[in-house]
């Protein structure tokens, strides 16, 4: 054996982290997301009050640091006397639940359809992609609204609707990645070895297409949270008294002028979560997309 | 000679390309009426410039594509689509680019086990592992390489992995699609020696596709020269290299670099480009670039003629001409 061994490369994970940590915003976003996730998981332990507990003698209490505020309710209370901080902490659970379920449905469905489109004969590919183009042509929130109107307003239906709206992005990405990989020699050699269609799709090609899909999932996650909050605000998503951030905004709408905190804090929660996830998604793209790598 | 491992008769592959809503597709003759056979332990080298149909030939023999017409027999069984599944383990392929031919997401052990999982589903996991270790040893890879990913290897080592993957099913025919042209010169000879060694030990038949004549001279038994999808010359290596009969072969040979600077070379510079395969000239396809072409060449197409050493040319080069022929 006289071939010289290539210098030992760092493990893929270490290499990933090296590229990822070059982007400071991404690292900050990553830690914010981790913190939010921990809050969501530990919500019943952290939250000072039951999110549905109505303290009728303390309605519309301002935040602790404002005059007339009460430090026992750090972020104040809403018109029904519920502690806003506790509701926000519990709301994080819903947001991440929505994100994971929506991305899960959209990604699994979209990747499957995208794989089929990439491997399919020309005509089937065209049929699938035109259908996806039609879905993409609708304003996404409007389409989600229509779907919810048909299915009936509830958090589950809103999630199904958002997943359907996000799905075409996965289909296109997967198909493009598959078509990029198919002419490569390793696919041909798997064919020569006799690999069947299912094996080619899921074992040979799919693992090589994952990088853009991971990035898309991170960005779709924030989209899902945003859309669910929007549907909640319009009364088409989670129904009161669920402490979902969008629904909280909607409930407090009429008190905007009298009590700024009832809308400010849920809005801030949405903003920070979405921003953090998007920053992290950008970093993921930089780290995973080989075209952006300098080496 | 024993019965050939692979036998092809009038193999033809025609693609239909272009075309749109209102335009008919044009036929592209990638390979036309190609016949050859390879016996166990022998190497047939297929030579030609890009676009001559070498890779299409490799794809047909490895049963990735079905020929448009003609007959392909592998190991005595007709290689029609219905027999592909049974013939999979008789023919394997090694590609040119060792960076693209290995799945980067799989460990070496998984890459080598995959053909076994597909074609020998009854094999136990332990037997499969033993077989993988055996081929790794055969191609000169160490056991600890099994747990590494392809990106951790150099080009030469990757090509060893590719050879090991091809051998794991114990095929009878190996299609080598320019297996060394992406490698450094020093690594090239290692891989070529490995291939020659394996051929001797396992009695493999090789279909060696290349455009590098110095490599072909090293490894081939018979040489088939292709031009625009058609065979122009076929014969034993010694005869083709010593006394080429087709002007194209001579031009190709004259373009091979020589290691001896004092040796005088008559470099034949061909004028013009390879004609488009969509618009093949009438008559001999080489006629527009041939210095010996006459009216007859442009009117009719010469057939591959001769006994052991065949050439498709109306005015084949004579012995004295090939020795020190001066082109016009």
Image (spheres, grey):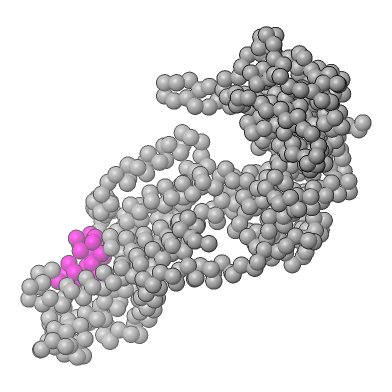
Q: Is residue A224 above or below residue A86?
A: above
Specify whether residue B68 is in view.
Answer: no
Q: Quadrant of the N terminus of chain A?
A: bottom right
- Please give the count of numbered marks on the rendered protein: 0
Percent from the top left, x then y, of residue A279? 35, 67
Along the line of sight, which residue is nearer the eye, B189 or A199? B189
Along the line of sight, which residue is nearer the eye, B231 or A167? B231
**Furthest residue toward front:** B262
Specify whether residue A19 is in view.
Answer: yes
Residue at position x 76%, y 53% from top? B186
**Furthest residue toward right:** B1
Left or right of residue A122, residue B28 in this image = right
Left or right of residue A205, residue A235 in this image = left
Magenta stretch: give its range: A229-252
Percent from the top left, x then y, of residue A294? 49, 61
Q: Is residue B234 above or below residue A39?
A: above
Percent from the top left, x then y, of residue A186? 63, 48
Q: Is residue A246 above or below residue B243?
A: below
The part of the image, by quadrant, that contains residue B39 is top right
- In the rendered image, residue A239 lying in the magenta stretch gets the answer yes
Residue at position x 10%, y 77% from top? A259
**Furthest residue toward bottom:** A71
- In the rendered image, residue B167 lying in the magenta stretch gets the answer no
Percent from the top left, x then y, of residue A155? 29, 63
């Amino acid at each position: 054996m006289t071939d010289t061994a290539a210098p030992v490369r760092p493990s893929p994970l270490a290499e990933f982290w090296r590229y990822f940590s070059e982007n400071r915003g991404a690292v900050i976003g990553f830690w914010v997301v981790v913190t939010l996730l921990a809050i969501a998981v530990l919500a019943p332990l952290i939250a000072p009050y039951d999110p549905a507990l109505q303290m009728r003698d303390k309605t519309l209490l301002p935040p602790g640091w404002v005059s007339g505020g009460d430090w026992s309710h750090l972020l104040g209370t809403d018109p029904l006397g519920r502690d806003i901080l506790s509701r926000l902490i519990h709301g994080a659970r819903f947001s991440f639940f929505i994100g994971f379920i929506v991305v899960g449905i959209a990604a699994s469905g979209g990747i499957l359809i995208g794989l089929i489109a990439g491997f399919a004969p020309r005509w089937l590919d065209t049929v699938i992609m035109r259908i996806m183009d039609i879905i993409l042509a609708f304003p996404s929130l409007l389409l989600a609204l229509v779907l919810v109107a048909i299915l009936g307003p509830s958090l589950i239906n809103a999630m199904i609707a958002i997943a359907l709206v996000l799905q075409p992005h996965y289909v296109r990405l997967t198909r493009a990645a598959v078509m990029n990989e198919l002419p490569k020699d390793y696919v041909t050699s798997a064919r020569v070895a006799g690999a069947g269609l299912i094996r080619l799709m899921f074992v040979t090609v799919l693992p090589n297409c994952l990088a853009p899909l991971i990035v898309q999932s991170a960005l779709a996650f924030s989209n899902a949270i945003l859309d669910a909050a929007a549907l909640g605000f319009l009364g088409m998503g989670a129904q009161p008294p669920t402490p979902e951030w969008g629904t909280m905004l909607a409930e407090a709408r009429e008190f905007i002028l009298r009590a700024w905190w009832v809308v400010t804090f849920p809005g801030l929660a949405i903003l920070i979560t979405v921003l953090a996830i998007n920053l992290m998604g950008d970093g993921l793209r930089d780290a995973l997309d080989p075209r952006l790598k300098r080496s | 000679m024993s019965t050939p491992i692979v036998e092809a008769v009038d193999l033809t592959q025609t693609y239909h390309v272009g075309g749109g809503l209102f335009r008919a597709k044009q036929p592209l003759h990638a390979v036309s009426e190609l016949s050859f056979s390879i016996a166990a332990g022998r190497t047939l080298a297929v030579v030609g410039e890009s676009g001559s149909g070498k890779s299409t030939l490799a794809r047909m023999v490895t049963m990735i594509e079905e020929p448009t017409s003609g007959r392909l027999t592998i190991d005595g069984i007709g290689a029609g689509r219905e027999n592909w599944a049974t013939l999979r383990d008789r023919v394997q392929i090694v590609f040119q680019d060792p960076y693209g031919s290995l799945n980067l997401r799989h460990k070496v052990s998984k890459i080598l086990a995959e053909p076994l999982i597909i074609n020998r589903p009854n094999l136990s996991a332990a037997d499969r592992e033993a077989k993988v270790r055996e081929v790794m040893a055969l191609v000169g890879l160490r056991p600890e390489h099994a747990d590494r990913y392809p990106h951790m290897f150099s080009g030469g080592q990757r090509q060893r992995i590719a050879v090991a993957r091809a051998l794991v099913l114990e095929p009878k025919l190996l299609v080598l699609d320019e297996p060394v042209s992406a490698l450094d010169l020093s690594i090239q000879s290692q891989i070529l020696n490995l291939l020659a060694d394996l051929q001797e030990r396992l009695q493999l038949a090789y279909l060696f596709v290349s455009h590098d004549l110095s490599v072909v001279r090293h490894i081939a038994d018979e040489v088939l020269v292709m031009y625009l999808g058609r065979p122009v010359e076929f014969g034993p290596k010694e005869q083709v290299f010593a006394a080429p009969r087709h002007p194209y072969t001579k031009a190709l040979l004259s373009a091979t670099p020589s290691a001896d600077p004092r040796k005088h070379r008559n470099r034949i510079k061909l004028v013009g480009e390879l004609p488009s395969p969509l618009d093949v000239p009438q008559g001999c396809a080489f006629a527009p670039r041939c210095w010996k072409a006459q009216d007859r060449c442009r009117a009719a197409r010469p057939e591959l003629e001769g006994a052991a050493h065949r050439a498709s040319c109306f005015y084949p080069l004579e012995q004295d001409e090939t020795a020190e022929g001066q082109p016009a």
